[in-house]
Amino acid sequence: MPGLFRKARAKSATGGSLFKPPMQTLIIEPGRAERNYWRDLVHYRELFFILAWRDVAVRYKQTVAGVAWALIQPLMSMVIMTFIFEKLAGLHSEGNAPYPVMVFAAILPWQFFSNALSLASQSVVTNANLISKIYFPRLIVPASSVMVSLVDFLVACSILAGLMVWYHFWPTWRLIILPALVLLAIAAAVGPGLITTALTVKYRDFRILIPFVVQFGMYLCPIAYSSSLMREKLGEKWFLLYSVNPMVGVIDGFRWAILGTSASFDWHGFIISVVLTGVLLYIGIRYFRKIERVFADII
């Protein structure tokens, strides 16, 4: 042991080190980044976590209410929809589920989708200085921004738990399917998010268009009403066309898992939503990969 300490002091005195970090070689050659893109995504995973943590910290630290905003927004939306659609319009819930619980079970995935789409569409432009200086897979930037919406979603789940306790409405075994539905909601948000991100870099007008699309899209989803009501009003053929909206299947899936037997479920519409979610995710990745090659030039 004394010999080891003398050796360490000798190394320190000569400016050496006993423990040297592994050297990483950066090879620059034409087409290498293209061939190793998906491998680089794994290699730069720490950057993904750093950007995600930074966005979450900025969202919650640089606000007056902090985490309360993630609770206030969905709670106020639920209160307003309950007052307008149940008290004034006379709409009712499915089965024996309380109307506020039914509405909030739909607000959770919709709020996640809308926030993720809005944040992802601005992510590349917001990180312009980082993108124009160093190389890394640009897909990390919009993907990390989605994590902020996921944190908001997890925080808002506490309100749903409180509502179910308040109304003495208990979930069934179907709740164990909820994590898979959360992954489906993430896929539904990432696909359009990648498309709008690339379009926003090329055409800055999309920064104004996205909030309008999000606000308008809320009325095309079964949030304040049930899908069974839309099927009754539209008929089977038009309802299948209505199910082309991927969020219809996501919201119905959330209600099926949270409300249990009180929620009806249409497998045909759900399968359509799942297929379209996969198609949009594929198109989003392909289009983003095509445009990201010139991000540094046009951003």
Image (tube, rainbow, N blue to C red):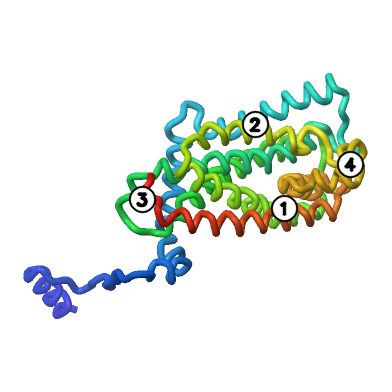
**According to the image, label 4 marks what residue?**
231
Total marks placed: 4
The disc, 2 or 4, on the residue closer to the chain's N-terminal end is 2
Q: Is residue 167 above or below residue 145?
A: above
Inspect the image, locate mark 2, and give the three-letter code of the amino acid beneath it: Gln
Which quadrant would residue 89 be assigned to in this image?
top right
- In the image, what residue occupies the spot 57% across and 43% down? 116
Could you say where residue 46 lies in the image, as x and y percent from the top left?
A: 41, 59
**Pointer 2 with pointer 1, Cβ within 8 A:** no
CA–CA distance between discs 3 and 4? 47 Å
Is 160 positioned to the left or the right of 200 in the image?
A: right
Q: Which residue is mark 3?
A: 296
Amino acid type shown at disc 1: Leu
Marks 3 and 2 sit apart, C-alpha to C-alpha, by 31 Å
Horizontal side, residue 64 vs residue 222: left or right: left
Q: Amino acid at mark 4?
A: Arg
Residue identified by numbered label 1: 178
Can residue 70 be seen at all in this image of the molecule?
Answer: yes
Task: Provide residue 167's location: percent of width, then percent of height.
Answer: 81, 34
Find the distance from the CA under tag 3 to the CA under tag 1.
39 Å
Q: In this rendering, which labeled residue sits more in front, label 3 or label 4?
A: 3
Q: Which residue is mark 2?
A: 215
Residue 24 in sight in this render: no
